[in-house]
Amino acid sequence: MLSQFSYSDQLTFFQKIRSFDYLLLSCILLIGIISSFAMYSTDGGELLYHSKSHILRFIIFFLMMIFLSFLNIKFWHSIGYTFYIIILGLLLLASIYGVTASGSQRWISLYFINIQPSELMKIAIIICLAKYYHRSQINNINNLMDLLIPITILILPILLVISQPDLGTSILIALTGFVVLWLAGINIKYFIYSSLILVISLPFVISFLKPYQKLRILTFFDPDKDPLGAGYQIIQSKIAVGSGGLYGKGFLKGTQSYLEFLPEKHTDFIFTLYSEEYGFLGSIFLLLIYAIIIFRILRIGMISRSFFAKIFCFSFASAIFIYISVNMSMVLGLVPIVGSPLPIMSYGGSSMLATMIGFSVVMSCKLYNKQLIS
Amino acid sequence: MFSSNDSGIKKLNTINRRMFIISAAKVTVFTGIVARLFSLQINENKKYLTLSDKNRLREWRLAPVRGEFFDYFDNIVAGNLKVYQLHVVPEQVENFKNLMTRLKNILNITDKEFSRIIKKKNNQRNWETLIVSENLSWDQFSKVNHYLHELVGAKPVLSVVRSYPYKDNYAHILGYVSQASESDLLNSEIIKKNYVPGLRVGKNGLEKKYENLLLGTNGVQRYEVNASGKRIKQLDYIEGAKGQNIKLTIDTEIQKLCNQLMTGKSGSISVMDIYNGDIVAMHSSPSFDPNLFLYGISHEKWKSIRNNPLKPLLNKTISGLYSPGSTIKPIVALSALENDIITPNFKVRCTGKMEMYGQTYHCWKEKGHGVLNLKGAIKRSCDIYFYEVARKLGVDRLSITALKFGLGTKVLKKTYRDEKKGLIPNTKWKRNTLGEGWVLGETLITGIGQGYIQTTPLQLCLMTAQLANGGYKIYPKIIVNENDESIESIKSIIVKNFKNHKESKNNLSGSSDNLLWFSNPKKHEPLYKNSENVKFVLNAMFASTNEVGGTSFRSRIDNSKYQFAGKTGTAQVKRITKKQRELDYRTDQIPYEDRDHALYIAFGPYKNPRYAVSIIVEHGGSGSATAAPMANKLFKLIIDRHELREKIRKKSLIST
């Protein structure tokens, strides 16, 4: 042990404010603004329900994120397991008392707001596993017994989310979990084995899938087979993006979305609308901002001294990357359609809340980067 | 814990290393996404832009406005009537079933009609206009407007449909239009191109022949629509071009008189200008009302028309084949004169019958005509005389003259698909088609227009016209064309042709400095060898009508303004047995289908001929009793209308 001297305790409030990662903050703000314009466009150029509540949420959650950033990183470390267990409890609650919408029971009604615990689990699983591997010894990490606990931590929420059913979110949780395991140093052979097992068991898994999920996978391979049915979303999304061209059709001029050819345009397909209106250049710009966000998070992870902070930052950056790439690949017709929102851009309170919590943990890592956690 | 601890450093290294591996993967995936964006938005932009427009734009094609038909006096004979229709676009209706039941009650639609509409709806796309009613009565229209607020999706629309104001008068000339069928679409590119549901196209007659001119082009309304097909806004409206109007050579008043004269009878009347070939009237009886076909004719009506024994659907003027009977005699006489077989002084004694190779040939006049020369034989239509002439002439020489004067070929060429050629027999024809040699007896009966010979009424009219104009070829037509030759120039060509013909006969090496004649050497060519022969025949026809003893003497008009000349004909449809000949029934005692056809050909006014007429009354009895009196009434009107017609003609000469 080096010493009990804690550097961060010496930072005054103003120093803390000064050591915020302002590039990261402004990128988040920029995406918030872009998403507000996109949402305004989905409402057909009027400030209606979706745009209003999206902007309101963004403002509230952004302020909350800044406020939470002042919490010591130790706090996040200390609540790691509790946070996970609470969200797991909420997931359980959702599958028993949850509100059903579009064939899936994912929401818990809290009078003023509907919460989607599976979205919060995306962040809880990272904090929880990061805490677990913060203490682990690199030499015992590949012991089967030591693997059992993190795998259980990972499997439980996945099973609960799959049963909702919500394939998209469970895949995202699983991928995030695997990233943490990977970063922690789990032997590469386990990943190879488990992917082999996945491939072999795929036919069985598919036989357990709901018919609409099977259809989605089939449709992905041949969207033109049923252009008005399951392939409709992919085809219309590709048309929207493709017709955007280099410069896009212009703000509020995305005919595909304006004329309601786009499905779920304010949630999963928000990027389609954005890409149709702002074209290739706009899309590249958005992607660039996301890349900067990821880069800044990685950088914060690198300057952090605790394993918890490092593992969290690296994992969270990868999680953001996974959300973005799955969502974009999906709307561009590169992977089958599974429900997965685009961070901050997509409409949805729980998703934004989870992302903002993640950012506040990252920011806390930045403010307390010299903080050691025993 | 962050110490010199080995395990800690190892852990740190592992985490960092693996972070970099993941970062590399991230770069790869992002590159992939950028590449995909590039391929969709840059490479395939055009394709997706088209698809997006296809999504968002929808065109509604409007029915083209059909060109109209006018008669010679610019009266509309096939026009476009403004009607109120009720349109429904099914996809814009929330509850189609409710709306239709509501409409059914308001419009009093019968169950049968209702199920027809539902069937029609099921056969078309959801965004295509469904025409619930083609022709709303004023009562229905105001009722629909009254309830319109309850009938969301129903649209009363002002539209145009074909109408034939003269009903049955023009049925055969114009034909009719009706809903385009599958085969119409398959056979015509232009119909396919301009098709909209409910489009009516010509099924028959001139309506069919000039479909491409008449049809016009679609108007287009382009709308932006949303995903559920709702029209968001109209982007474009392109007015279609109306089809071309067509002007006929027909005079409706004369056409109407023809129809009147033939009331209750089966047959045909045609009237032709003997110089420019204008068909002034052309009526086939009985006729039908083409308006019946507009909205789909009812089964009962269709059956009654189709099963009518008098065959209203047949255009007898061009498709009816008849033995010309005695109306062929002027041609037989001309042919014999031209071939120098006989002279006008050639005499035959008619005793009512003659024997040849054991066969008895009868004259229509049982007691016989006594001794006759050629003029007398034409005037009294003596059969025995013409048996003799035909015997001397032979069928081959006769057929050449008959063909020359317009028998045995289609008069209007390709104008009507159903025009028949008829048949002018000769020995070669019989050998080739029947495989038998020609028999002399057949020549004899051909000489009085019986036997194999078959002609259409319009051919007889053309033959008469080409005799009446002095024996010059004319080109019959039913449509007025800007480039038509004027009567004046036709007459001058004829005069020059006459001179040239005479010169070339007198002086074989004689040349002509007439440029016009050289430029149109074939135009209005003389059909005779000696114009005197034609003059003689016309004179004999005059006698037949205007001299005592002539077969149509009773139908004559003495006023020289209206005076016409003609030749009667009575065509047997059945061989008369010896017994029947002895019984000598009156026409009304013979069963209808065994009665003779009554024919009459004529031209007038005699002093300065201008019009030719042919009349055929099927099973009408004798030509002189049934057909010739019609010519009397006809010529009065034709001559009275002549001034007016000339006025129109001269006006158009100035304007063009």
Image (cartoon, rainbow, N blue to C red):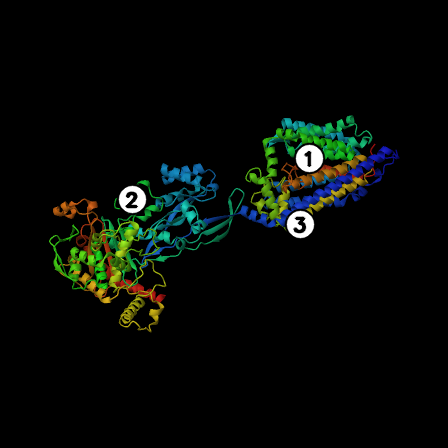
The location of residue B48, given as percent across then percent down, is: 59, 47
Near mark 2 (Cα within 10 A), the count class, few <14, some 14-19 or many ≥20, is some
**Tag 3: amino acid:** Leu
The location of residue A284, given as percent across then percent down, is: 68, 47
The label shown at residue A172 is 1
Are both tags, 1 and 2, on one chain? no
- Report the Cα–Cα distance between label 1 and label 3: 28 Å
Query: Seen in the image, is B227 located left or right of residue B531?
Result: right
Q: Chain of mark 3?
A: A
Picture quadrant of residue A329 = top right
**Badge nearest the viewer, 2 or 3:** 2
Quadrant of the frame with the C terminus of chain B: bottom left
**Tag 1: amino acid:** Leu
Q: Which residue is mark 3?
A: A281
Front residue of B169/A84: it is B169
The label shown at residue B305 is 2
Query: Seen in the image, is B312 located left or right of residue B354?
Result: right
Front residue of A244/B348: it is B348
Circles 2 and 3 in contact, beta carbons < 8 Å: no
Among the two numbered marks 1 and 3 on one chain, the one whose residue lies closer to the N terminus: 1
The location of residue B637, given as percent across then percent down, is: 23, 59
- Report the Cα–Cα distance between label 1 and label 2: 77 Å
Q: Is residue B255 above or below residue A315?
A: below
Circles 1 and 3 in contact, beta carbons < 8 Å: no
Circles 1 and 2 in contact, beta carbons < 8 Å: no
- Report the Cα–Cα distance between label 2 and label 3: 72 Å
